[in-house]
Amino acid sequence: MGSADSKLNFRKAVIQLTTKTQPVEATDDAFWDQFWADTATSVQDVFALVPAAEIRAVREESPSNLATLCYKAVEKLVQGAESGCHSEKEKQIVLNCSRLLTRVLPYIFEDPDWRGFFWSTVPGAGRAGGDDDGENARPLAESLLLAIADLLFCPDFTVQSHRRSTVDSAEDVHSLDSCEYIWEAGVGFAHSPQPNYIHDLNRMELLKLLLTCFSEAMYLPPAPDSGSTNPWVQFFCSTENRHALPLFTSLLNTVCAYDPVGYGIPYNHLLFSDYREPLVEEAAQVLIVTLDHDSATSASPTVDGTTTGTAMDDADPPGPENLFVNYLSRIHREEDFQFILKGIARLLSNPLLQTYLPNSTKKIQFHQELLVLFWKLCDFNKKFLFFVLKSSDVLDILVPILYFLNDARADHSRVGLMHIGVFILLLLSGERNFGVRLNKPYSVRVPMDIPVFTGTHADLLIVVFHKIITSGHQRLQPLFDCLLTIVVNVSPYLKSLSMVAANKLLHLLEAFSTTWFLFSAAQNHHLVFFLLEAFNNIIQYQFDGNSNLVYAIIRKRSVFHQLANLPADPPAIHKALQRRRRPPESLSRTGSQEGASMEGSRPAAPAEPGTLKTSLVATPGIDKLTEKSQVSEDGTLQSLEPMSQQSSAEGSPTAEASLAFRLLIHQPYLRGAGLYPTSPVSPWP
C-alpha cells in the first residue's frame, strides 16, 4: 500500500469517527484497525490529518467513541509490549498508536470532565498477581505507562538484541533484564551499543508520548496547594516501573555522551542527518520532568501545613519515593561525575564555538534544558556540586551561562532562562572554590557584545552583570539583588579586577545611590549595601592587587559624599522623587561622567616603569583625599565646615543604614531572597 493510499484510508477513518453519532462497539476490530493496522503514517501526517476541531467535536458529540479509541490504542500498545514486537506489522501498529495518542491526549487533559478518564479502571486490565476484576483492576494510565516502559527496552525495536537469531528463539520480554540493554555507555554501564538510527527514531516516538502523558499539569488551573503531585510522574517513577533504573541511566548517558560536532568535519550536519540530536533533546526533557521533585512530595505535612523535611534531607523521605531522584542522589563515583560534567559542559559550550568557516559546525538549541538538568544535579546530589566546585571545569559551565544570560537579557520570552542561569551562579558563588577559580585569566574570546578587556573570569562576570542590569528588560529587576549577591559572595577572593570591571561596579553604585532611586522603593537601598560590601571585601582581603578598583573609588568619591549626605527630611525626599520626572543629568547615557565610551572600554596606555606603587604606607589620610561637602537641592556639591558636617552626619540615615547593612552581611548565598522590591523601579532613565 502506497503512502498516499495510507493517508487516504487514515483520513477516511477519522471522518467516519467524527460523523458517527452512534457508539461504535469496542469489538468492532474492522473499524478500529483502520487507525493503526492498515496505515503507515508519520507523526506529521497524524497531526495534519486529525485536526484539533474534529477531536473536540468527537469529545463533545460522541464521547464514548473517543473513549473507545483511547482504550483500543492503549490495548494495542500493551499487546505489543507483551509480544515483543517481533514482526514489522506489530512495530508499525505500536508506532501508529503512539502517534495517535500523542495527538489526542492534550484534548483529553484540557477538558475538566475528562481528566479522570485515564485513571479509571478498565475491565480485563488487572494488576500483577491479582484478579482482573474488582479492586485489582489497573487504571488505563498505569497500563499505558508500563507499556511505554517495556517498549523502550524491546529488542530489535528500541534496543539491540543480544540473540543471534530472533526468528527461532525470540527473547522473552518479561524475563528480560533491561539493565543489560542500557542505551549508551556512561554512568553504571561500560558497554557502548552499536548506533542504530531506527532504534533512535522509535525511542523518540515513545518518549514524545511519555512527555505528552506528563504534560497534564500544563492544563490544570493554578491550585492553592502547590504540593499537588503529578500522578503520571509519580507512578512512572515508583517501584511499579521495573525499568526505572535502566531508563534513568539510559536517559542520562544519552544526554551526556552526545557530541554534536563529532570528528569536526566542516558542514557534516548539512551532509548527513543527525538522528541522535532529537532523541537527546527528548531525553533531556523527560529526565527533567521525572526529576521534578520538591519538598512537598518528600516530606510529610504537619498540622500547620509546613513540612518536616526537604528533598535534600539525609534521611529517606517518607511516603512514595521518586526512584529517579533516588538514583540521581546516589551517584558517587568520580569518573561518573567527570563524565556528566564533561558532557554537559561540551553541550553548553557548543553554541559558542567559532570556526574560520561560517556555520560549519552544528549548533544545538536545547541549552535551557541542559541548565535545568545541571541545576537538578547540583540540587539533588551535593557530592556532584562539590566535585564541580573543586574542578577547574566549573569555568566551562560559567562562560556558557554568562553567554546565554547576555544573549537573553532583552528577550521577554526567555526570562525563565535568565532565572535558572542566575540561580545556578548564585548556588555556585556560595562556595569558596568558585571565587578562587574566577581568578583564572579569561583568554578564550566568546562572541558577546561587551567591552573589550584583558583580565580574568571575574571581570567577565562583572561586565556581563553590568550589561544585564543596565540594558535588560524590566522583568529582570527582581534579579538585581541576586546578581549583586553573587558579586558579594565572590568578592573576597578577587585578586585583580581590570579597570573595565572596576568602572562597571562604580557605575552601578552611582546609579543605585541616586536619591530618587533610593527613595522610590522600600528595598532599593539593599543594592547599595551589596556594592559597598563588595568594595569592603576587596579592599580588606585583596587590596594589593586591586589598584584599579581603588583608583576608580577615589575618582568617584563624590558618589560616596552624596550617599553620606542623603536628605532625611520629607520635603527634600519629595523634591528628589519629583526630579525623576525630568531626565536626570547624572544618569543619562550621554551626560554620565563615563561619557559616550566608558572609561576602560579602550585599552589603556602602559604605565611608565616604576611609577605604579601601591602600599598602605604611602597612602595619604582620608581627609586629604576627600572634600567636606554635601548635596544641595539642585544636585551640586557644597563645601561644609567641620562642625556642620559632623552634625549632618549625626542626623543622616547612614547610621541606621549601616546597622541594617551589618545585619545583611555574613549571610550565605540566597540571602537576597525576600528583598525584592514590591514595585520595581528602574534606575535607568
Image (cartoon, rainbow, N blue to C red):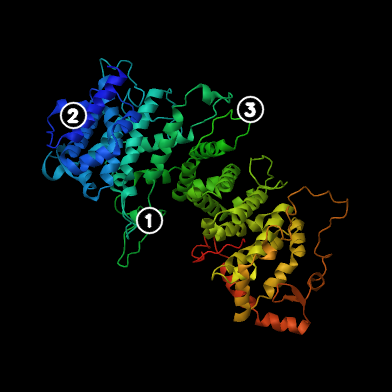
Position of the N terminus by quadrant: top left
For mark 1, what is the residue? 295
Q: Quadrant of residue 667?
A: bottom right
Secondary structure of residue under mark 1? helix
Q: Is residue 448 left or right of residue 80?
A: right
Which residue type carries mark 1? Answer: Ser
Q: CA distance from mark 2 to mark 1?
A: 44 Å
Which residue type carries mark 3? Answer: Leu
Would residue 145 be seen by someone viewing this image from the given angle? no
Badge 3 crowding class, 10 Å Cα cut-off, few under 14, some 14 to 19, many 20 or more, is: few
Mark 3 vs mark 1: which is more N-terminal? Answer: 1
For mark 3, what is the residue? 357
Q: CA distance from mark 3 to mark 2?
A: 54 Å
Secondary structure of residue under mark 3? loop
Q: Disc 2 vs disc 1: which is toward the camera?
A: 2
For mark 2, what is the residue? 32
Q: Residue at x 33, y 32 (%)?
A: 48
Indicate the position of residue 554 as horizontal and vertical percent values: 77, 64
